[in-house]
Image: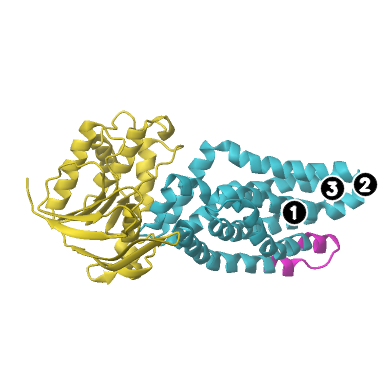
Amino acid sequence: MLEVVELTCERGERSLFSGLNFAAPGGTLLRIAGPNGTGKTSLLRILCGLLEPVSGEVRWHGRNVRKLREDYWKDLVYVGHMNGVKDDLTVRENLRVNAEVAGRPASPDRLADALERVGLTGFEDRMARFLSQGQRRRIALARLYVSETAPLWILDEPFTALDVKGVAELSALIGQHVRNGNTVALVTHQEVPIDAPRRQRVEFAGGGSGAASSVEEEATC
Amino acid sequence: MLRVLLQVIRRDLLLAVRQKADVLNTLFFFVVVVTMVPLGIGPEPNLLRAIAPGVVWVAALLAAILSLARLFANDYADGTLEQMLLSSEPLTLIVLGKAAAHWLVTGLPLTVMSVVFGVVFDLGLQETGVLVASLLLGTPVLSLIGAVGAALTLGLRGGGVLTSLLVLPLYIPVLIFGSGAVGAAASGVTYAAYLLLLGAFLLFASVLTPWAVALALRISVE
C-alpha cells in the first residue's frame, strides 16, 4: 500500500504541486501523466525517497518512507530516467553488479534468463558502450525480471527508446506484475494499454497552475 | 553486508582496469612531480635527502586530489549512483567500498612507487621503510576524507576547485605527521608516535567519513 499524504513539492523556488493525496493499494497501476515540466519525475523521485518533499509524506504500509529507508528500498525497484548502465561493463556484468549493489544478488541462471527475456541473448559479453539506446534501456529493464518479487516498481518513461515488440512485452510484464498484487507507478507519454485490475491516474495540469488531481479509473480491458 | 562491500570494490576495480587512462594519469602525475623537484633544485644529495619525504608526501596528496573528481562523478552522470542510494544495503558500506577501491588504484600504487623514490633520493633502509609505512597508513585517510569533499561538491559547476578547498585543510595533519615520521626516523628520534597518530587518523576516518559521505550524497542527488 503506497500512500501519498498532503504532498507539496518545490523545485528551484517554483511550486510544482501542493496538497497531493492518493493511495495505491497492492494490485494498482498508478499512471502519472501531464505535460513536460509539471513535476512528474519529481513526484517519482519523492515516491522513491530520493527527493525530500517540502511538506507531506509518502507512506509504505502506513509508515513514512523517509523513516523506513532501507526497509522500503528492499521492496522497491526504480528504473529512472537514467539507465544506470556502466559503459565499461558488459551487459551481463551490468546486470549482475546492479543486482548485487541493490542488495538482490541473483544466480547466473537468473541473470541469463532476465537477459533472454529482454532480448539481449547474444549480447551478454558486449560492452554496454557499443549498444544502442534501446538496448541500454533493455539492460535497465532486465532489472525488473531479476526482481519480480519486489512489491513496488517505480518506472520513469519505461517505454522510451523501445521498439514496438519491446513496448508490448514490457506492458505485458507490468500488467502481470500488477495482477500478482503488486503496485506499479509509472510516468509515460505514450498511452500504452496495460491490462490491470485497478488503475489510478494522477493528472498534472499544465500552465504552471501547480494543480494535480488523482482519479480512479474504471477497470476496463 | 560484507558481500556488498566486496562487490562494490570489485566493480570499481573492474572499471578502473577498463579505464586505465584515468588511473595512469594520477600515477604519471605523481612520478612527474617527484622527479621534477630534484631537476629544479639541483643535485645536492644532502638537501635532496632532507626534502625527499616532504616531496613524496606533497606529490601523493596532490595526486589524490587530482583523482577525486572521478570518484562519484561518473556514477552520478550515468545513474548508477541513484541506484546505490536506493539499495537495501547500508549506503555507508557502499561508500566505504568505493573509497577502498579508490585507495587500491591510487594510494596503494603510490605507496609501492615510493620505495623506488626512497632509493632515488638515497634514503636509508629505515627511512624508506618509514616512508612506505606512513604512506600505507596515510593514503587511505586521503581517500576517505577526499570522498567527503567529492560527495559534497557533486554536480556543482567548478566542483573541482571547491573540493580542493574543502579537503586541503583536512589533509594537512596527515601531511605533517606523514612526512614528520620520516624526518624523525632520519634524525634518529622515535618515529612510532607519528605512525600511531596516522593509524589513529585512519581509524577515525574509516568510522566517521562513510556516514558523512552517505549523507552528503543524499543531499547532492536531490
Mark 1 lies on residue: B58
Is disc 1 surrounded by few (<14), some (14 to 19) or many (20+) residues within 10 Å?
A: many
Q: Mark 1 lies on which chain?
A: B
Chain that is cyan in the image: B
Chain that is yellow in the image: A
The quarter of the picture where the C terminus of chain B appears is bottom left
SS at circle 1: helix
Q: Earlier in the sequence, mark 2 or mark 3?
A: 2
Rounded to the nearest whole Å, what is the CA distance between mark 3 and mark 1? Answer: 18 Å
Question: Can you tell which mark lies on residue A53?
Answer: none
Question: Can you tell which mark lies on residue B44?
Answer: 2
Q: Which amino acid does label 2 sit on?
A: Glu
Q: Earlier in the sequence, mark 3 or mark 1?
A: 1
Residue lying at 83% horizontally and 47% vertically, measured from the top left: B121
Which stretch did the figure color magenta? B181-196
Is disc 2 surrounded by few (<14), some (14 to 19) or many (20+) residues within 10 Å?
A: few
Q: What residue type is labelled 1?
A: Val
Residue A114 figure quarter = top left
Q: Marks 1 and 2: which is nearer the front?
A: 1
Determine if the magenta segment contains residue A162: no
Magenta stretch, main secondary structure, is helix
Q: Which of A63 and A115 is in front in this view?
A: A63
Residue at mark 1 shares a chain with residue at mark 2:
yes
